[in-house]
Image (cartoon, rainbow, N blue to C red):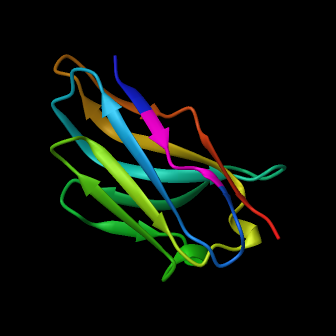
Amino acid sequence: QVRLVESGGGSVRPGGSLTLSCTASGTIFSIYAMAWYRQAPGKQRELVASITSGGLTVYADSVKGRFTISIDNARFSAHLQMNRLEFEDTAVYYCHADRASTGNMIKNYWGQGIQVTVFS
C-alpha cells in the first residue's frame, strides 16, 4: 500500500510564498510522475503542476512563472514552491502519484489534501 503524505500548507498574504511537500511511503519501486492538483470551493479539481521522474514539467497557465515543481526520485518526493501567491490560489491542494509500482501492481494514488489560504 502506498501512502502520500503532504505538508507545508497554511495561510499567507497576497504576494507571499509557501512550499508544499509530498512524500510517498510504502514498498515502492518507481513512480512515473508526481503532480499537484487543487480544488477551490465550488470548482472542479484542476492540475496545477506535474513532473515526470525524468524532470519533464507541465504547469497550469495560471501558475506559470510563479510556481515551481521539483521531484526527488530517491525519496519519492515532490515539492511545489509557490511564489507571489494570489487570492485565486486559495484551495485544497492534492498530491498525486502517477503509475506507482509496488512490484505486483501499478496504480495511481492521491494524498488527503492540504489547505492553502491566501487572505488579506
For residue 16, above or below residue 119:
below
Position of 113 with respect to 29 (left or right) is right
For image coordinates 58% across by 50% down, the residue present is: 9
Location of residue 90 (image quadrant): bottom right
Point out the image quarter for the C terminus. Answer: bottom right
Determine if the magenta segment contains residue 24: no
**In this picture, which residue range is highlighted in magenta?**
5-10
For residue 26, above or below residue 10:
above
For image coordinates 74% across by 69% down, the residue present is: 88
For residue 21, above or below residue 82:
above
For image coordinates 38% across by 55% down, the residue present is: 79
For residue 31, above or below residue 91:
above
User: What count of labels does the image hold?
Assistant: 0
The location of residue 103, given as percent across then percent down, is 16, 21
Determine if the magenta segment contains residue 9: yes
Point out the image quarter for the N terminus. Answer: top left
Q: Which residue is most to the bottom?
A: 65
The location of residue 24, given as percent across then percent down, is 33, 34
The location of residue 22, given as percent across then percent down, is 40, 43
For image coordinates 44% across by 42% down, the residue present is: 96
Identify which residue, 38 or 46, lies in the foreground. 38
Location of residue 57 (image quadrant): bottom left
The secondary structure that dominates the magenta segment is strand
Identify which residue, 12 or 57, lies in the foreground. 12
Location of residue 28 (image quadrant): top left
